[in-house]
C-alpha cells in the first residue's frame, strides 16, 4: 500500500494500529498493509474495530498479564501466574493434580494495556486476512463478524484499483479486475 494511505490508516485509528511501526520481533504489523485497491475495505473495517476498542475502555491488564496496579506501584514480581494440568500418573502413590501453578517471567518494563489491536493485515490466497491480538472475548466475537464481512468483500475487489475483480492465478492468487489483469498486474490466466 502507498505510504500516504498507510499513514492515513495509522493516524486515523491509533488504538487499532498501535503496533504499526513496532519491531518485527513484536508484531507483523511492521510489514504494513496489502494493495491500494483494498484501502476502502480496510478503512471501513478499521472504523468498526476502532469504535469497538474505544467503547471497551482501557484494559487493566498489561500485555505481560500483570495488572496495571502492579506496574504503577512497582510491585510487578517478574512472574505471571498461569495454570496447567498436573503431571501425576494417576496412581494412588502419584495422583494427578488437577492443576499446578507456574510462573513465566515478565518481559515488559512499563505498563502496556492489552487492548484489542491489529496483529497483521495481509493478502493470502487472493483475499484479505486481518488478525488481532488482545481484547476481551466479547470484543473478539464482535470483531470476527466485521472481519469476515471485509474478507468476503476482498474476494471480489481488485487489489490494485478497487474495481470489481476476480481471484485468479496461476501461482500467486490475486484479485484483479479485467483492466489490471490486461496491464500485466499478475500472471493471471483466463479459464
Image: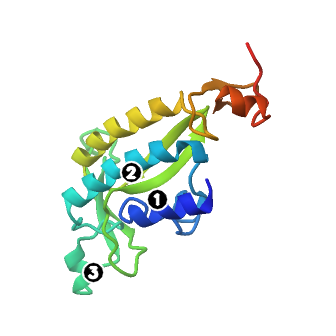
Q: Which mark is residue 71?
A: 3
Compare marks 3 and 2 and give the one earlier in the sequence: 2
Residue at the spot of label 2: 46
Name the residue at 28% across, 80% down.
76
Instruction: List x then y, in percent, for residue 90.
Output: 29, 38
Residue at the spot of label 1: 9
* Disc 1 to disc 3, C-alpha distance: 31 Å
The front one of 1 and 79 is 1
Q: Report the residue that reaches farthest toward the top.
A: 191
**Cβ–Cβ under 8 Å for marks 3 and 2:** no
What SS does tag 1 mark?
Answer: helix
Name the residue at 38% across, 59% down.
16
Instruction: List x then y, in percent, for residue 53.
Output: 27, 57
**Cβ–Cβ under 8 Å for marks 1 and 3:** no
Q: Dot 3 surroundings within 10 Å: few (below 14), some, or many (20 or more)?
A: some
Q: Dot 1 surroundings within 10 Å: few (below 14), some, or many (20 or more)?
A: many
Instruction: List x then y, in percent, for residue 45.
Output: 38, 45
Compare marks 1 and 3 and give the one earlier in the sequence: 1
What SS does tag 2 mark?
Answer: helix
Observer able to see residue 97: no
**Cβ–Cβ under 8 Å for marks 2 and 1:** yes
What SS does tag 3 mark?
Answer: helix
Q: Quadrant of residue 167?
A: top right
The front one of 42 and 172 is 42
Q: Nearer the viewer, mark 1 or mark 3?
A: 1
Vertical side of 44 occupied by 185: above or below: above
For the C terminus, the image quarter is: top right
Side of 103 where 6 appears, left or right? right
The front one of 139 and 156 is 156
Amino acid at each position: 500500500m502507498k505510504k500516504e494511505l498507510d499513514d492515513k490508516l495509522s493516524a486515523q485509528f491509533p488504538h487499532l494500529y498501535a503496533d504499526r511501526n513496532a519491531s518485527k520481533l513484536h508484531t507483523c504489523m511492521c510489514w504494513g498493509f496489502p494493495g491500494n485497491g483494498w484501502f476502502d475495505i480496510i478503512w471501513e473495517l478499521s472504523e468498526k474495530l476502532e469504535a469497538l476498542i474505544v467503547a471497551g475502555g482501557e484494559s487493566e491488564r498489561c500485555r505481560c498479564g500483570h495488572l496495571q496496579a502492579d506496574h504503577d506501584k512497582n510491585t510487578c514480581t517478574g512472574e505471571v501466574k498461569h495454570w496447567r494440568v498436573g503431571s501425576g500418573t494417576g496412581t494412588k502413590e502419584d495422583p494427578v493434580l488437577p492443576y499446578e501453578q507456574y510462573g513465566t517471567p515478565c518481559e515488559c518494563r512499563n505498563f502496556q494495556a492489552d487492548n484489542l489491536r491489529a496483529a497483521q493485515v495481509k493478502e493470502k490466497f487472493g483475499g484479505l486476512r486481518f488478525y488481532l491480538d488482545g481484547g476481551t472475548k466479547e470484543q473478539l466475537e464482535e470483531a470476527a463478524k466485521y472481519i469476515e464481512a471485509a474478507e468476503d468483500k476482498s474476494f471480489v475487489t481488485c487489489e490494485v484499483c478497487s474495481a470489481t475483480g476476480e481471484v485468479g492465478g496461476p501461482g500467486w492468487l490475486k484479485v484483479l479486475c479485467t483492466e489490471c489483469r490486461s496491464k500485466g498486474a499478475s500472471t493471471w490466466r483466463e479459464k
